[in-house]
Amino acid sequence: MTAQPPDTVTAQPPDTATAQPPDAAIAQPPDAAPAHPRPWALLAELTHGCPLHCPYCSNPLQLVRRSRELTCQEWDRVLRQAAELGVVHTHLSGGEPLLRRDLEPIVASAASAGLYTQLVTSGVGLDEARLTALTGAGLHSVQLSVQHADPGASDRIAGHRSFAAKERAAALVREAGLPLGVNVVLHRDNLDALDALIELAISWGADRIELANTQFYGWALRNRAALLPTRDQLARARESVARWREKLGRRTELVWVLPDYFEGVAKPCMGGWGAVSLTVAPDGTVLPCPAAAALPGLDPPNVRDHPLEWIWDHSAAFNRYRGQEWMAEPCRSCSRRAEDFGGCRCQAYALTGDAARTDPACALSPDHGLIRSLTGPAPAAEPPPAGYIYRGYGRG
Amino acid sequence: MTAPAAWRPVLAPAVRLRHDRVREVDLLVLPERVVVLRGTAGAVLRLCDGDRDLGTIVAELTERFPGAPVDTEVPAFLDRMHEEGWLR
């Protein structure tokens, strides 16, 4: 009879930051029955508007205008369809979701549909009244981004004076008794401050700290020369994470999203295409991965035209790189193909112009030289950065 | 640790116990994580309401599942859930 050991499954890919596409380290969900396994998570990008201007912004180069955004009623329908489809978690993200004045009813829709609802925010605009209203609407948890442990450096990287607001937001979330995750996108400018960043997140009361090395597509690719870390920086950071994990034990979860440019292996992007999660963009476009808007000819479906279940099961976009049929060599015969799914389609496209090629981050890829030349033992220096190209809404 | 009989286990505030109708399993849901509960794990955790103590939980389950090794397995299972931080 009784209590069999429950399997622990991290079914949550969007290790989503406000600013960084999801990525790596995902365990596979358990055996699921239907034709295509049902999705576990929905990333709801409520708006592309954002007060921050992060140089590694994960939103597509072409941003959605505010006037094209889904209405509150449309989100209600989408979130209910998601719950019926099997989605368990929803991440209300952006841009900055707090810019939506109707965020509270959207949270209420998600929570009443039975979804575990997390707000993914920069913290800008989260005052006590707003958080009380969101908690009252059923919000379950908050993920807060921070750019650096030093307030001045954090503001400089974000391109906006936001550190003080983040600190306040963290305190409010703790007072409200909600679980708090702190997310940091890591790069050359903040990797050396990793210890201070972890200390900061602990002092803010974080239950979970996500250290996400920058993934280079979209805006981050434009700033690659300024963001790409050195091998030494990464080696020190890895040691630091190992030390902290030992010290913290199970008190605080420390997530390290691999810097795939340096690993020689591709990341199991999204846990597989159309396998674990889906993203709904502000205008209702549905994507297998938040960065996939950049892929040519994908012709992504829209919730304004189709129900979510049809989109998941039958749309061409969701079936395009599903499973292994689409793979070419060296992936097709590779023993790792069921573990890394050929890596990241968006990265393959960004670097080779062909989204169906092996991810160049993999040492077995014929295109690996594109990355190795930047991160090998004697990297060919990209032109010295003159500073960041900051992200701006309306400038995309 | 060995769970004391007077312990009144209750789910940690961040943890939700729910049935997944689509996959027909019980789940523990936390931020960024889903724990799939096998067998009767969900039924055991539903009794962890902060009112019942361990002794009561074991007694109720023994009645419900006669002949099963409830008194050894259930405290060990709840202990493990406590170590994970999912039960208080």
Image: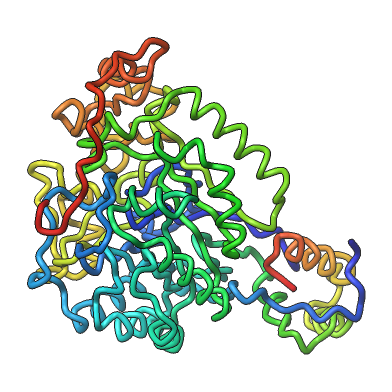
Where is residue A146, by image quadrant?
Answer: bottom left
Name the side, left or right, on which A159 lies relative to A349.
right
Q: Is residue A205 above or below residue A129?
A: above
> For this rendering, which residue is in front, A146 or A365?
A146
Measured from the top left, where is residue A360 in percent x and y?
29, 24
Label count reads 0
Instruction: Return the x and y of residue B25 as percentages of the image width and height.
Output: 54, 68
Residue shown at the point (39%, 70%) measured from the top left: A119
Tell me the residue at 30%/75% (across/down): A79
In the image, A228: left or right of A206? left
* Residue drawn at x 92%, y 73% as measured from the top left: B4
Residue A73 coordinates in the image, percent (x, y) = 20, 84
Residue A302 in sight from this viewpoint: yes
Direction top: furthest residue? A378
Indicate whether A185 appears above or below A303. Answer: above
On screen, residue B29 above or below A132: above
Nearer the observer, B86 or A164: A164
On screen, residue A323 above or below A199? above
| Corner quadrant of residue A386 | top left
In the drawing, does residue A93 fall left or right of residue A304? Answer: right
